[in-house]
């Protein structure tokens, strides 16, 4: 669907790919489908008035990449809550770690290109100090 | 300790001003079942959970609620962006303007200031978790009432996300409560 010029050859984080990942557990949505529903677990999804989930429509390259990052981080948040109460589920732990590693790579690519979103980013080794840079999360 | 991630949990980009909805949305910023209340409630109750499952779940849900509080703050800021004094007055926000102008302040939809009496902690896992389950249900229904007050998809999308998170949190608390009831029975 689109390419980030600096994505490594061996890892394909393209949005289309992220939306069709084939290794997920049958009981779970993929990270993007989970994000737009607010829920990774199919059995817990109870939409209000049977509304369809709203697609996220990123306006630019940065927003596209951020949506992929949001998707992976959301998958991690929701799986971690499940694992807190179900710490013996091997498949969920494997899936959590799959998303964690992808998130780690994507975070680095995103921050190298668009600036820091964490205070341990390599992007902070620049003059001037980049943490202040806009936009802040509430700005549009 | 906590670390800040300089992004929202779910993207928000509201471009249409809606002051009446901003006022209603304060229910989730500083009301009894607000995201602020939820976050403080779980982060404060976690110390007296019976074991590590409770410590972990209340820490992680409490942390996520703080991210939701930031989402509500963002929605209120964007819904009120550029509002004039006249517009604020015409939409029931003259009192708000007088005291807070365009600042965010944790009050409920009727202007009642946030109080720690909302956050409840008994030291009893069953009382606390069942109260947390009920709090999630009340927050879910509040989101439904907020969704009923708008037809702007840029607002409905994040509200449906937040609403479904309440459903998931409710089920995790229930799972934990059931696990403890079984563990400590007899």
Image: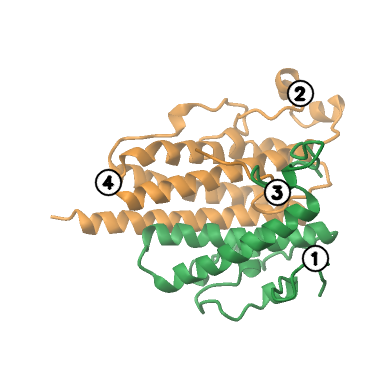
Chain colours: A green, B orange
Q: Residues within 10 Å of mark 1 (few under 14, many from 20)?
A: few
Alpha carbon separation for disc pair 3 and 1: 16 Å
Q: Secondary structure at mark 3?
A: helix
Front position among marks 3 and 2: 3
Direction from residue A86 to residue A24 in the image, left or right: right
Q: Residue furthest top?
A: B98
Q: Secondary structure at mark 2?
A: loop
Q: Residue at x 60, y 81 (%)?
A: A22
- Which residue lies under the disc numbered 1? A6
> Label 1 marks which chain's residue?
A
Examine the rendered structure and indicate whether residue B50 appears above or below residue A73. Answer: above
Alpha carbon separation for disc pair 4 and 3: 40 Å
Question: Which residue is nearer to you in this view: A120 or B107?
Answer: A120
Direction from residue A22 to residue A16 in the image, left or right: right
Q: Residues within 10 Å of mark 4 (few under 14, many from 20)?
A: some
> Label 4 marks which chain's residue?
B
Alpha carbon separation for disc pair 3 and 2: 38 Å
- Which residue lies under the disc numbered 4? B50
Q: Residues within 10 Å of mark 2 (few under 14, many from 20)?
A: some
Q: Secondary structure at mark 4?
A: loop
Q: Does label 1 lie on the same chain as label 4?
A: no
- Image quadrant in which you'd find residue A62: bottom right
- Which residue lies under the disc numbered 3? A122
Examine the rendered structure and indicate whether residue A3 appears above or below residue B140. Answer: below
Residue B101's label in the rendered image is: 2
């Amino acid at each position: 669907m689109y390419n980030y010029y600096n994505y490594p050859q061996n890892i394909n984080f393209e949005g289309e790919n992220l939306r069709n990942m084939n290794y997920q557990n049958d009981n779970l949505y993929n990270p993007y489908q989970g994000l737009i529903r607010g829920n990774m677990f199919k059995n817990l999804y109870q939409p209000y008035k049977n509304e369809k989930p709203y697609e996220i429509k990123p306006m630019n390259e940065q927003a596209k990449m951020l949506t992929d990052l949001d998707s992976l981080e959301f998958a991690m948040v929701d799986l971690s809550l499940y694992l807190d109460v179900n710490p013996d589920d091997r498949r969920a732990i494997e899936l959590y770690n799959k998303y964690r590693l992808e998130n780690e790579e994507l975070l680095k690519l995103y921050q190298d290109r668009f600036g820091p979103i964490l205070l341990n980013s390599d992007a902070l080794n620049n003059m001037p100090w980049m943490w202040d840079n806009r936009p802040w999360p509430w700005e549009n | 300790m906590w670390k800040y991630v300089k992004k929202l949990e779910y993207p928000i980009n509201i471009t249409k001003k809606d002051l009446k909805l901003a006022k209603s949305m304060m229910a989730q910023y500083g009301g009894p079942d607000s995201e602020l209340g939820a976050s403080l409630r779980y982060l404060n109750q976690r110390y007296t959970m019976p074991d590590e499952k409770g410590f972990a779940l209340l820490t992680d849900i409490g942390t996520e609620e703080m991210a939701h509080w930031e989402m509500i703050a963002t929605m209120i800021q964007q819904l009120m962006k550029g509002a004039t004094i006249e517009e604020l007055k015409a939409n029931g926000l003259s009192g708000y303007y007088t005291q807070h102008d365009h600042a965010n302040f944790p009050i409920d939809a009727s202007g009642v200031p946030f109080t720690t009496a909302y956050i409840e902690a008994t030291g009893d896992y069953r009382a606390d978790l069942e109260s947390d389950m009920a709090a999630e249900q009340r927050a879910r229904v509040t989101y439904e009432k907020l969704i009923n007050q708008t037809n702007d998809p840029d607002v409905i999308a994040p509200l449906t996300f937040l609403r479904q998170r309440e459903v998931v949190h409710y089920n995790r608390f229930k799972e934990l409560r059931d696990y403890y009831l079984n563990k400590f029975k007899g």
